[in-house]
Amino acid sequence: MDALQPYLPLIVNALRVLAIIGLIHAIVTRQQVFWIVMLAFGALFGGLFGLAFAAVYTFMVLLPAARGGGQVAGRAVARGVEALKPLDLRIREAQAELAESDTLQRRADLAALQARAGRPDDAQATLSPLLSGIYADDPVVLLTSAELDLARGQAAQAEAKLRRVDLKASAATRTRTLTLLAQAQEAQGQPEADTAYREALNAATTEEPRARYAAYLVRQGRRDEARALLDALDKAERRATNLYRRQEREWFQLGRDLRKELK
């Protein structure tokens, strides 16, 4: 121990740097809250437990990520940095990229940013050229445009576009299409919405159909049916991996809110 004494300040500083790096990584990759809290403690105060957690996080998370998923981690960091930019700046950059090269992906990206900024009319205008061109029947275009129609209160137009989507394209496309179709039909007061929600539940690739159907049942006053779905959603959350839990957090949160409402 005496031999290490001269090196202790260097070791503490190294661990503190690791705590800072780990904290950034944990926030960008959305790790569990306790990691973030302990790493923040180590980065800010350099406490024994905080620095110990920095070492543990390095060996348990950072190094495996660097060995097995360096490119994935890099993309996650890039997305995190991109997300820090003001939304207006990201929209201007996306508009400049679209002016440079007009592609389906760039139009879809710009439309998504405009929708997030609360500008559904601009987003729909961005997508409109695709609806009459070679991409008119592309699922990405139809689904994005239909979602924007719903945000603008144009449920009938959304339904018409959703009817054009090829449900055999993929399981994810089928899930998203039927979920949006159910929402569009519900907004129009159509009883077929119940069937659409049920079909979306079959082989669903996300928890959204289950959560949205439960919300629909609550609005319909069918509380027992809603409670059964919410119990299944709660069980799915408890059994889910951390990655899946983060991915589906919006729908798990909706389920928790609905359970409170039913109490």
Image (cartoon, rainbow, N blue to C red):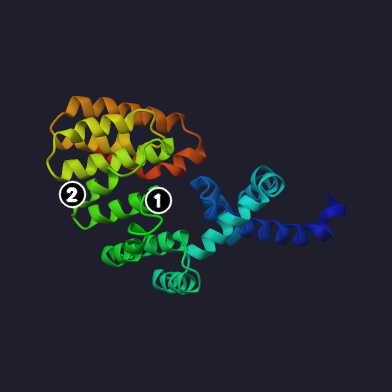
Circle 2 — which element? helix
Give left or right: position of 163 versus 252: left
> Helix, strand, or loop for circle 1?
helix
Amino acid type at mark 2: Ala
Q: Are marks 2 and 1 in contact (CB under 8 Å)?
A: no
Could you say where residue 153 lies in the image, as x and y percent from the top left?
Answer: 18, 55
User: Residue at left 21%, top 52%?
Assistant: 157
Identify the residue at image location x=44%, y=37%.
Answer: 170
Up-down relation of residue 77 to residue 199 (above or below)? below
Left or right: 140 with respect to 39? Answer: left
* Classed neighbour count for the residue bearing mark 2: other residues with Cα under 10 Å, few (<14), some (14–19), many (≥20): some
**Which residue lies under the disc numbered 2?**
156
So how many labels did they put on this image? 2
Q: Is residue 47 visible?
A: no
Residue 162 versus residue 118 in the image, above or below: above
Residue at 46% from the left image edge and 67% from the top image edge: 102
Quadrant where the C terminus sits is: top left
User: Given the image, on which type of amino acid does mark 1 rest?
Assistant: Val
Q: CA distance from mark 2 to mark 1?
A: 19 Å
- Give the quarter of the image for residue 112: bottom left
